[in-house]
Image: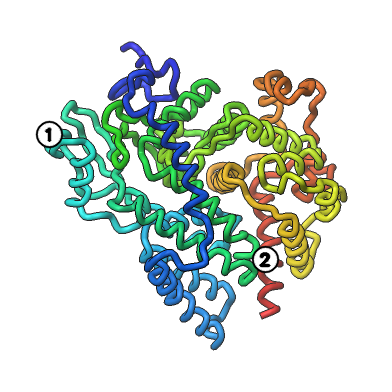
């Protein structure tokens, strides 16, 4: 059998249910203008107002109040035996409030659920239930949406259409189906009125955010107004599936150009894509957490992780595009060992100077160029344009030898975190969208290593990937940055120092790294607990 022609440019499956030709896809030319229009809408949606923006505020305040007030009452009366019990209780209450408030807040919960290491463990665990356990819409609503958008009766378009959703999340739910032409597909259907609800909720968040500044530690750290803007930039592009389908083609093309044979993107249907309906090729494989199943099938899980790290880094640095929402529900491993990527509603795009700034940030990290890293963060938008870089380095003590956090007491650890946070807030630091997506994905890959390759030597992998990257892309990227690529050397001692290790250490398995982290976290928890 001849190879499908679209595999000459895209990372698709070998057996095509249909062939995608970019120049004939009707919905593709609409994607770029739609993306531009969505981002142009963000400033208006996130502009703080003096007056509450409509009756929706009442619903939001009531739901959050019903979550927070009982928790505060129980906490004051000493109902919680351990601080972890208190965190688990508020996490559960906030998750229930998010589900009650609907798509926007559920989506925020989903983002939190992917932030292991960035948010409290109890909050992450609880909000993982928002990934695919959100109550689905009734089937008659799904039928109506599909028929309205595709312009025909369900029975005329599909040979079969499962009434029970495979998964249901904040923006949409997915159903298995079979086309009249015999292809097995997945149909993603947007929840009705979700677009209008999201826009209303963003305006409510923008009104609430300034009132949270400095009131609670988490809010102070996150910079609520900036967080709302960041969230808006992310979610507005998920409200039109034509943008998502275009993202699928862009990512497939990028992976193919990189020669990354370990990844596969399902084909979107050339015709059956609208604002609220996306029909795509159906793939199957192992859940990303099914380590035993993969091992029984002879799949090299270390290779799966390694491929993910390389493809993710190359996509961002070389092509300026990467899947922006990696988590266990958005990818699975097929029986041949390749990883299938799913859900392309959130994609990171780095263009022009921002991609070069991101490249300088990664280069500065591996060469231990502290000033280069801070300058790159400024150019990415994490710091104001007029920031005094030398002052930042001095105030954050970046010019001093890194401290081994395992050698600090709980009190010293908490004090160090508070010092850094206070300094960053003083400089007006914020998290740009692309950097947030990249960091969130790195956190996911970090967790993937824990499950799939706990004995992987982190130091050896960093050295190997850096050398591979230099060999494959060094000349091109050096030309873009105006430097001599043969003179760039990875500073492994600096990398070790970043982990709090002595330069004499030659190996660090992920299992050992986790033990160090757990020790640090325990000391911080114990210190916080003794102060209560």
User: Does residue 310 appear in the picture of this structure?
Assistant: no
Percent position of residue 293, x then y: 42, 42
**Residue behind mark 1:** 156
Label 2 sits on residue: 522
Is residue 84 visible to us here?
yes
| 119 shown above or below 317 | below
Q: Is residue 50 left or right of residue 380?
A: left
Position above or below: 432 against 77: above
**Residue 16 % position (x, y):** 32, 22
Front in this rendered view, residue 423 or 75: 423
**Of the two numbered discs 1 and 2 in the rendering, the one whose residue sits closer to the viewer:** 1
In what element is the residue under mark 2?
Answer: helix
Is the C-beta separation of discs 1 and 2 under 8 Å?
no
Residue 118 placement, left or right of 24 = right
Q: Could you say where residue 206 lies in the image, as x and y percent from the top left?
A: 51, 60
Q: Is residue 219 left or right of residue 298?
A: right
């Amino acid at each position: 059998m001849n190879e499908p022609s679209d595999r000459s440019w895209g990372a698709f499956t070998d057996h095509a249910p249909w062939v995608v030709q970019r120049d004939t896809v009707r919905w593709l030319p609409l994607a770029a203008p739609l993306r531009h229009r969505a981002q142009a809408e963000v400033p208006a949606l996130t502009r703080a107002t003096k007056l509450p923006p409509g009756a929706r505020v009442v619903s939001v305040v009531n739901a959050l109040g019903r979550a927070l007030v009982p928790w505060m009452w129980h906490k004051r009366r000493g109902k919680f035996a351990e601080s972890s019990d208190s965190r688990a209780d508020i996490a559960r209450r906030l998750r229930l409030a998010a589900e009650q408030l609907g798509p926007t807040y559920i989506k925020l919960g989903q983002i939190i659920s992917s932030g292991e290491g960035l948010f409290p463990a109890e909050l992450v665990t609880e909000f993982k239930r928002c990934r695919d356990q959100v109550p689905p819409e009734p089937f008659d609503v799904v039928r109506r949406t599909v028929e309205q958008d595709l312009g025909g009766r369900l029975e005329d378009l599909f040979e079969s259409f499962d009434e029970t959703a495979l998964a249901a999340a904040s923006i949409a739910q997915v159903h298995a189906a079979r086309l009249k032409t015999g292809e097995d597909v997945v149909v993603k259907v947007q929840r009705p009125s979700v677009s209008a609800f999201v826009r209303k909720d963003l305006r409510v968040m923008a009104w609430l955010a300034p009132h949270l500044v400095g009131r609670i530690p988490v809010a102070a750290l996150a910079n609520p107004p900036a967080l709302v803007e960041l969230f808006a930039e992310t979610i507005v592009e998920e409200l039109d599936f034509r943008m998502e389908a275009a993202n699928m083609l862009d990512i497939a093309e990028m992976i193919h150009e990189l020669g990354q044979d370990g990844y596969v993107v399902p084909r979107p249907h050339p015709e059956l894509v609208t604002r609220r309906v996306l029909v795509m090729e159906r793939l199957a494989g192992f859940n990303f957490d099914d380590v035993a199943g993969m091992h029984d099938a002879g799949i090299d899980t270390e290779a799966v992780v390694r491929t993910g790290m390389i493809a993710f880094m190359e996509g961002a640095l070389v092509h300026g595009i990467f899947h922006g929402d990696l988590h266990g529900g958005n990818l699975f491993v097929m029986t041949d060992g390749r990883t299938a990527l799913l859900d392309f509603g959130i994609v990171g795009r780095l263009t022009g100077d921002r991609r070069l700034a991101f490249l300088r940030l990664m280069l500065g990290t591996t060469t231990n160029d502290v000033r280069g890293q801070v300058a790159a963060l400024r150019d990415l938008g994490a710091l104001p344009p007029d920031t005094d870089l030398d002052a930042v380095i001095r105030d954050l003590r970046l010019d001093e030898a890194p401290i081994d956090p395992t050698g600090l007491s709980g009190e010293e650890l908490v004090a160090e975190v508070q010092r850094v946070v206070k300094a960053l807030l003083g400089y007006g630091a914020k998290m740009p969208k692309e950097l947030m997506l990249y960091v969130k994905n790195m956190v996911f890959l970090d967790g993937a290593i824990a499950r799939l390759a706990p004995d992987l030597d982190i130091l050896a992998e960093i050295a190997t990937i850096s050398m591979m990257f230099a060999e494959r892309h060094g000349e091109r990227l050096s030309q873009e940055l105006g430097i001599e690529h043969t003179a760039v050397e990875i500073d492994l001692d600096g990398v070790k120092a970043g982990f709090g290790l002595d330069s004499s250490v030659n190996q660090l398995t992920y299992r050992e790294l986790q033990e160090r982290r757990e020790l640090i976290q325990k000391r911080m928890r114990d210190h916080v607990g003794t102060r209560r």
